[in-house]
């Protein structure tokens, strides 16, 4: 499932690791247990620096690769989704490349946000984790872009996870605390916490709806359907100006 550059040291940090990718595929497959997600099972690549993070340019290249891979096949955009669990942090003054981490916020990166918007214009929906710093998503890329579905984290008792980012550009909440899915160890599962888990639930929901309902080929249509199905005002502790919507499939 995962593929790693052989000459690059790996220092997995919170939620960004091979375990996270395996967990994520299990989560998406659990929400959408049909063949619509089969194309997501290859092409994973991780590049870490010595601090366990990455740089924006690498992730932008990966995003562009995914968009080009999708658009190379006619009609594929209508049955695809790009999930991103990451956030941009502020670079040091001496650095020219912006770092990516899972747990920090920073100034928005317009170049990355524009890539997400351009993908949306081509009919490709991106689902993004709000990130885990307890700050407004307006400070985070790509979570702060209006061209993606941005997902914050809630717990099983319907309370807001304390480290989840928030703000008017969050679209909805989804389960993100102690959520079980696949582990790297055969026959075992693992519980992970974070907005990464929440975003993956919504990505699975997108694929589920695309495979079970008609008329959801466009980004606008599937986004509207996701928000239409949400449960309203059931999450406790939602910060001011943040939508109180909880992801729901309309059935279970």
Image: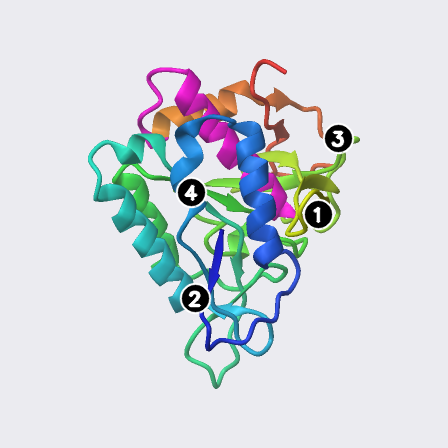
Q: Single out the residue that lies furthest toward the right.
A: 157
Whether 206 is among the magenta residues is yes
Q: Earlier in the sequence, mark 3 or mark 2?
A: 2
Nearer the observer: mark 2 or 4; the answer is 4
The residue depicted at 63 percent of the width and 22 percent of the height is: 232
Q: Residue at x 58, y 31 (%)?
A: 30
The residue that disc 1 covers is: 193
Magenta range: 194-219
Measured Cα–Cα span from mark 2 to mark 4: 22 Å
Give left or right: position of 217 versus 19. left
Q: Which residue is mark 4?
A: 40
x, y (%) of residue 156? 76, 32
Please tell me in which quadrant of the rendered image residue 77 appears.
top left
Foreground tag (1 vs 2): 1
Judge by depth and name the residue closer to the eye, 71 or 157.
Answer: 71
Residue furthest front as drawn: 186
Q: CA distance from mark 1 to mark 4?
A: 22 Å
Q: Could one spot residue 118 in this view of the protein? A: no
Q: Nearer the viewer, mark 1 or mark 4?
A: 4
Residue indicated by mark 3: 158
Q: Compared with residue 136, is residue 26 higher up or lower down, i.e. above or below? A: above
- Type of secondary structure dominating the magenta stretch: helix
Q: Which residue is mark 2?
A: 56
Which numbered mark, 3 or 1, is in the foreground of this view?
1
Please say if the residues under marks 2 and 4 sit with CB atoms less than 8 Å apart. Answer: no
Label 3 CA crowd tier, 10 Å (few <14, some 14–19, many 20+)? some
Q: Secondary structure at mark 2?
A: helix
Q: Nearer the viewer, residue 203 or 184?
A: 184
Comes first in the chain, label 3 or label 1: 3
Q: Is residue 119 left or right of residue 29?
A: left
């Amino acid at each position: 499932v995962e593929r790693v550059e052989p000459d690059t040291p790996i220092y997995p940090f919170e939620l960004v690791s091979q375990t996270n990718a395996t967990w994520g595929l299990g989560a998406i497959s659990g929400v959408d247990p049909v063949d619509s997600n089969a194309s997501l099972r290859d092409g994973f690549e991780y590049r870490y620096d010595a601090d366990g993070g990455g740089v924006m340019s690498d992730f932008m290249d990966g995003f562009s690769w995914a968009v080009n891979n999708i658009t190379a096949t006619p009609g594929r955009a209508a049955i695809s989704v790009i999930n991103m669990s990451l956030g941009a942090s502020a670079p040091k003054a001496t650095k020219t490349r912006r770092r990516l981490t899972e747990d920090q916020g920073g100034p928005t990166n317009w170049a990355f946000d524009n890539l997400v918007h351009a993908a949306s214009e081509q009919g490709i929906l991106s689902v993004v984790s709000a990130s885990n710093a307890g700050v407004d998503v307006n400070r985070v890329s790509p979570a702060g872009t209006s061209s993606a579905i941005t997902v914050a984290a809630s717990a099983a008792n319907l309370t807001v996870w304390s480290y989840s980012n928030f703000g008017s550009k969050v679209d909805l909440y989804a389960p993100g605390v102690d959520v079980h899915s696949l582990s790297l160890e055969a026959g075992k599962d693992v519980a992970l916490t974070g907005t990464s888990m929440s975003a993956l639930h919504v990505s699975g929901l997108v694929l589920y709806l695309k495979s079970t309902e008609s008329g959801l080929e466009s980004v606008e249509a599937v986004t509207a359907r996701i928000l239409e199905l949400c449960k309203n005002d059931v999450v406790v502790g939602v910060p001011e100006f943040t939508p109180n919507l909880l992801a729901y499939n309309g059935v279970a």
